[in-house]
């Protein structure tokens, strides 16, 4: 039986496996199809394709865009024929610029509070990657204004701290539209979260979110996912049927930081076939 995993991360976002290591893991797991879906980055795709030369593994270039809804976060997956450009890259650039401006804003506030930190140190901690709040935190710690990272957040850059700066907000509809405009297939990622004991951690209401995103061009919904009880999957399948959405799924593999194993979630082969049909259309 053919085996697909449509949701995996590399070191291009918060995965611990390099693209080449992910390919090796996919071969070990006996996958036929692998979707590479890093958070807000497509950097892992080209090296993965390169590492995959000569293998019997089909790579689907993808993305997972982190979006905001009132009171929470929503992730939107996108699948493409090739490494996406255009509207999606413009959106990713906007997110990177937003993260950088936010970090700069926190540095400015620390300076205004009489605790200057060097921007160069923030940049250095990012090690060439996308600059974010964790790098500001490390620079504050290094400057000696707190005893540990927890204290940095409690005293300065946590949500109620005096040097906190709000994140750039992105709606899931904007992400869906950008993926569409770049020739991709937008899919709502894991609408629910469940922990290992089966308890729901947090949720958006797909009954209201899905119609809004379908209007923006949504084509699929992630139904096959870690720890999803049958009842949750059945509920999502009904919504998918109502809007003729593709039922996708995957392990959300992150390497060593999470227990998810690559290929560890059953994904019907039809999910891949329908995605391919959409991408070919
Ligand atoms: Zn996610
Ligand atoms: Zn993910």
Image (tube, rainbow, N blue to C red):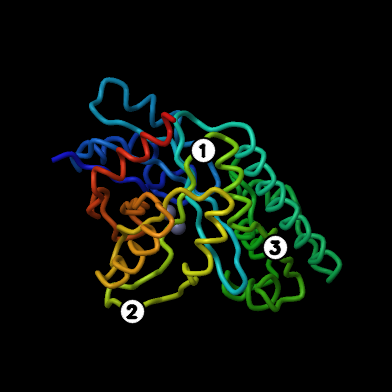
State whether residue 205 is above or below residue 135. below
Q: Earlier in the sequence, mark 1 or mark 2?
A: 1
Q: Which residue is mark 1?
A: 42
Q: Is mark 1 within 8 Å of ligand 2?
A: no
Q: Secondary structure at mark 3?
A: loop
Q: Is residue 229 left or right of residue 145?
A: left
Q: Which residue is mark 3?
A: 143
Image coords of residue 197 (percent x, y): 27, 77
Which residue extends farthest top?
54
* Circles 1, 2 touching at the beta carbon (< 8 Å): no
**In-image side of 27 versus 203 (left or right):** left
- Circle nearer the viewer, 1 or 2: 2
* Residue lying at the far left of the rendered structure: 1
Q: Residue at x 50, y 61 (%)?
A: 210
- Tag 1's secondary structure? loop
The residue indicated by pointer 2 is 199
Query: Number of marks in the image?
Result: 3
Along the polypeptide, which appears first: circle 3 or circle 1? 1
CA–CA distance in space, label 3 to label 2: 41 Å
Q: Residues within 10 Å of mark 1 (few under 14, many from 20)?
A: many
- Split into quadrants, the picture shows ligand 1 in the one at bottom left
Residue shown at 26%/71% (left/top)? 229
Residue 20, image x and y in percent? 35, 33
């Amino acid at each position: 039986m053919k085996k697909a995993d449509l949701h995996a991360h590399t070191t291009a976002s918060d995965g611990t496996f390099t693209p080449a290591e992910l390919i090796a893991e996919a071969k070990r797991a006996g996958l036929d199809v692998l979707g590479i879906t890093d958070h807000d980055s497509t950097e892992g795709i080209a090296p993965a394709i390169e590492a995959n030369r000569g293998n019997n593994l089909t790579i689907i270039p993808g993305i997972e865009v982190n979006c905001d809804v009132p009171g929470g976060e929503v992730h939107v997956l996108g699948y493409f024929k090739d490494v996406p450009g255009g509207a999606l890259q413009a959106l990713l650039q906007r997110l990177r610029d937003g993260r950088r401006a936010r970090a700069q804003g926190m540095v400015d506030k620390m300076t205004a509070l009489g605790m200057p930190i060097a921007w160069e140190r923030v940049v250095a901690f990012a090690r060439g990657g996308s600059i974010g709040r964790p790098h500001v935190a490390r620079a504050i710690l290094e400057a000696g204004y707190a005893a540990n990272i927890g204290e940095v957040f409690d005293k300065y850059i946590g949500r109620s701290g005096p040097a906190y700066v709000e994140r750039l907000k992105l709606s899931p509809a904007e992400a869906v539209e950008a993926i569409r405009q770049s020739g991709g297939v937008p899919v709502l990622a894991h609408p629910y979260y469940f922990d290992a004991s089966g308890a729901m951690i947090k949720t958006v209401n797909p009954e209201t979110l899905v119609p809004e995103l379908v209007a923006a061009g949504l084509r699929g919904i992630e139904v096959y996912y870690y720890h999803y009880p049958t009842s949750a999957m059945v509920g999502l399948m009904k919504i998918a049927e109502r809007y003729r959405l593709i039922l996708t799924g995957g392990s959300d593999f992150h390497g060593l930081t999470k227990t998810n194993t690559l290929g560890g979630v059953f994904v019907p082969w039809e999910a891949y076939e329908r995605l391919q049909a959409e991408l070919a259309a």
